[in-house]
Structure formats: C-alpha cells, structure tokens
Image (tube, coloured by chain):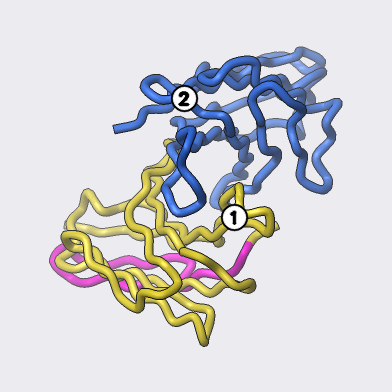
Chain colours: A yellow, B blue
Amino acid sequence: SQQGEEDPQALSIQEGENATMNCSYKTSINNLQWYRQNSGRGLVHLILIRSNEREKHSGRLRVTLDTSKKSSSLLITASRAADTASYFCATHNQAGTALIFGKGTTLSVSS
Amino acid sequence: GAVVSQHPSRVICKSGTSVKIECRSLDFQATTMFWYRQFPKQSLMLMATSNEGSKATYEQGVEKDKFLINHASLTLSTLTVTSAHPEDSSFYICSAREWGTGAGQPQHFGDGTRLSIL
C-alpha cells in the first residue's frame, strides 16, 4: 500500500526557476527519503531526513520535515532541464524493512 | 557507490511463458532485496521482500505462486513471473539494502525490467 500523497502530481517550470514538491505520510517515521526516477529507469536516492531534523540541504536540494503535520517538502533551486524526472518520497513499512513510496511528482523543466 | 544490476532490461514474450528477472548487487552483499511493480505514470508498489536463505515475504494481494522469488546468495535475487498473461505486463524494479545497514540508510535500485506479454 502507498504511504501517502504528493502534490502536485505534475509540475512544469522554466530553467532557472525553483520547484517545490510536497509529500504527506500517514504513520510515524524514523526518517523520510526522497528519490528521483528518470523515465523508464530505476530510482536514485537523493536525500534522507531523520525524524528529529527539520531541514536538510544537499547541493541545490532542500528538504523540510514537519512531523506534527506528517509532511515533507523537496525544493530544487535553480532548476535545469536535466532535473526533468519523477520525484518520490518514501518512508518505511511497519516492519521497518521495505520502502513505501508516495504517488510522486512529475517535474518537467524546459529550457 | 553501490550498484544493483537488473537483467533483462526488457522482455517481450507470448502469453503463457514464464519469465525470470535477475537482480544482482555488484559491489556489496545484500541479505534483503525488494521487488516492486510500477504501472505507467504511477508509483512503485511493493510486491515482496526477498530474504537470503529463507522464504520471501509477500505483500497482501500478491500471488506467491505467480511471482516466485528466490534469493539463493547474498548478491542475487530472482523474480519469476510464471505463466505470464497480458495483465502481468508492467515495469518491475528491484532494490537492495547493503548487509549490515539498517532502515536509516538508502536502498539501491536496479534500472528495472519492462515486461510486455503479448
């Protein structure tokens, strides 16, 4: 079963603009992860934020986590055409083993 | 970095055929691997957790006799879609977690297998 929702489902922006994607989840978590998927490919891990962290940065990525609202956001600054992909948030299942993914946001960055 | 190789990348076969998909961790050992299924423009749905040397754990609604999983070594898990039918057509993705790491570490994904059943 899926963990939660992401919005927007699709986002189209111009190069240089910022892209913000949101994710909500249902259960308590130890951490939340964001992954990227290029069309027809596997997933690549982007960033992990722990439940006791509120914000984390990695290059042009900024992730926030609000455990009271059970939500997270991923901000990509100064987007590039190469950022075009689907982005998924993921948390662990009850057993704490497998990742459960949100529905994803499809980002299109045009030059 | 950790690499997971999934093979084949694409399969097209006739209805009734059984298809085997391999998932290998190339530079690390993985006691646990995961199999996901993804329909077009949708998210990944967990099918089963593959455990080295023991039976796989299947998610609710996934037929274990239809999707046979074998995890015979620390670097290889296989998913066999038995007697495949057009409704089994999908994108199958495996992932692996490095042995000794917990839930606080990322998983490593293969590039997926696109299965098309005619």
**In this view, A93 is above or below A24:** above
Q: Residue at x 38, y 71 (%)?
A: A21
Q: Start and end of the magenta stretch? A: A3-20
On residue A48, the disc is: none
- Could you tell me residue A48's position as x and y percent? 37, 59
Q: Which element type, helix, strand or loop, lies under badge 1?
A: strand
The residue that disc 2 covers is: B29
Q: How many marks?
A: 2
In the rendered structure, the answer to whether residue B87 lies left or right of residue A43 reads right
Q: Residues within 10 Å of mark 1 (few under 14, many from 20)?
A: many
Q: Residue at x 42, y 36 (%)?
A: A41
Membership of B24 in magenta stretch: no
The residue that disc 1 covers is: A100
In the rendered structure, the answer to whether residue A61 lies left or right of residue A53 reads left
- Could you tell me residue A99's position as x and y percent? 56, 51
Q: Residue at x 36, y 74 (%)?
A: A53
Q: Is residue A23 visible?
A: yes
Look at label 1 and name its amino acid.
Ile
**In this view, A37 is above or below B28:** below
Query: Residue at the front extreme?
Result: B100
